[in-house]
Amino acid sequence: MMLTKRKAENPNFTGSENKILTEFEKSKAKRAKLETKTEKKDKDSKLKNSLLKVKKNTQIPDDSLIPKNRSITTKKGKDNKLQKRLPKVKKSAGIPNESKIPKNANTLGKKKLIKYGTKKKKSLPNGQKPDDVDWKEFKKAQKKLKEKRKEGSEPSRYQLSVKAKEVWEELRRDDTPEAKKAALCSNLYSTLRGNFNELIFAHDTVRVVECIVASAPLPIKQAVFDELKNNLMLIVKSKYAHFYILKVLRYGTKEQRQNVIQMFRGHVVSLLRHKIGSKVLETAYNDWANALERAEICQEFYGPEFKIFKEEGIYTLNDAVAKHPDKKVAFLNYLKEALEPVIEKGLFQHSVVHRLLFEYLSMCGEKEKEELIQSLRGACVEMLHTRDGARITMICLWHGTTKAILSEISSNIKEIAFHEHGRKVIMYLLAGRDTRYTHPQVIDILKQGDNNVHSKKELGVRHRELRDAISPSLLNSVVEDVEEWFSTNANILVLLDILEHCNGDLKPVHEAIAKTVCSLEKVEDKDKNQVLPVEHTGAHFLMKKLMQLDKKRHESGLSNLFTSTLLDQLTADVISTWISTNRGAFTLVLMLETEIPTIKDELGEKLATFKKALKKESTKGATVLLSKLSK
């Protein structure tokens, strides 16, 4: 190009001149190419070092930016792919482009590392040094700036909230006299009148409004409610303002509560799906609504027509189907569609949800029931606190596998057996539907699950299999920690049920109990007194029942008896201690009254040497025991 241009400018060039000019141009082009390559290499080297520094300070793995055995300079082939990949990697890692990387890249990386627990240094005015600053004035200036930021575009609104909170601070105190509270409420209402619809949605001023509802006289409460009643649906769904509705339900008048519940009309289904609105709906339904209002709330889940037209006499889904039998499928489908978003959001803790789920499970088909149960199995624990929730859990259990349930019970056997309500489960597994342990009404409810598709065996066979499955865990638990089973009278009642109904080898359990009651170390009874184990009320009751049970077992031909095991533990020291106490002597009387020949003869031989000691005792038990031995 340059040669052509030169020729055009100087057409009289000779051949030698043209040759020199050509070599000069080639040399110049080669030198320019070499310089470009060197500059590019230096630039790539700087970029690579900067990237490595930034990568080190931002804790990016080596392989995420530069693969091993790869050059970072642009070449043909594979390195072109690397060069195209670098911008994406740098962008995802928050690294600036190569043209924007400063020389102090290492310092830049350190600035990005935030140390928690350190305060950001405040910038000083006009570049002053810390020693030259009046810190009191500086803090006042900072405070004014903060207040100015809070004021925003409406300083009058901010000043209004500040005045309201100053009055609220005095109003909410417990030591403020009632007369002064009334005056403060009147002053506060006159200050905020006309602004409640805006202040109600702020996290701080809504507390002022709540305090007015809780403390103000009735006319002021009504005036505030009248100002807000047109926006109640927005308030119900607000993160902070919904607390005002809860205060109205608690401290408001009967008419105000009715207005709130009537406000739900037509919006119940959407409110139940709302995380915040569902809490307000649940409080109104569970704590304040009457039977008719609860029925009207539930009607909206049966069909869209019930949002506008409520029908008398429909309190449950069963009532709606009985009144409109041709709409049963439509009612069930609409109820299912309304509950599906609630289940997906995990809003299982509300009693209104439990009622609707139980109504649906009671009337839907087996296929629909199986589908819903699959969704509810993980939430059964969250629903146990209500009556309908407990029944839903029973339905889930009836459609579950027995092995999974029993394995869970076996792994937590003592926790369940020692619980006030959990012990009823253990007694049911062992004794079945015995009215001594389970109320007849509860048995009637349990009978509803007898005909489910998973229970194909007879009731007696099922109970025997359940008892056989749970017995080993119960017996092992007693042997491992018999003292804990003796700790309360309630636990001893469960222990008696175990010894009466469990299947398996009872000998280890009998030995553990016998060693405990024959111990001469004193224990604490229910009155916090130190007594011998044989004098403990629960222990004495347990031995009495076990000896009565041994009498029946001996008549039935059984040989595994608790009384014979106890007899083996009666040493001379134990007998000497027992006859000196009333209950200890009566325990020996109970052993003789079993009328088992071997026990009666052996015990008589052991007690023969203690007749003189018995005559010296004045307790009723010693007198009865002596008369038994004299026969």
Image: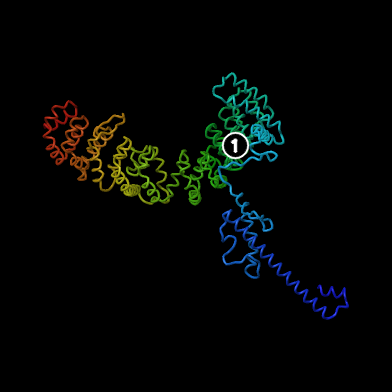
| Quadrant showing the N terminus | bottom right
Nearer to us in this view, 497 or 557: 497
- Left of 533 or right of it: where is 372? right
Amino acid type, callout 1: Lys
Tell me if I can see residue 558 in this picture.
no
Nearer to us in this view, 548 or 142: 142
- Residue 270 x, y percent position in the rendering: 60, 42
What's the image's color scheme?
A: rainbow
Could you say whether the residue bearing mark 1 is in a helix, strand or loop? loop
Looking at the rendering, which quadrant does residue 186 occupy? top right
Furthest toward the top, the residue is 179
- The residue at 40%/42% (across/down) is 446
- Left of 415 or right of it: where is 181? right
Q: Residues within 10 Å of mark 1 (few under 14, many from 20)?
A: some
Looking at the rendering, which quadrant does residue 591 occupy? top left
- Residue 39 x, y percent position in the rendering: 69, 65
Nearer to us in this view, 31 or 511: 31
- Residue 125 x, y percent position in the rendering: 69, 38
- Left of 70 or right of it: where is 445? left
- Residue 395 x, y percent position in the rendering: 45, 45
Q: How many marks?
A: 1
Nearer to us in this view, 491 or 388: 491
- Left of 410 or right of it: where is 628? left
Which residue position holds label 1? 310
Furthest toward the bottom, the residue is 15
Looking at the rendering, which quadrant does residue 255 occupy? top right
Query: Looking at the picture, does residue 279 appear above or below residue 18?
Result: above
Tell me if I can see residue 421 in this picture.
yes
Query: Looking at the picture, does residue 384 appear above or below residue 95?
Result: above
| Quadrant showing the C terminus | top left
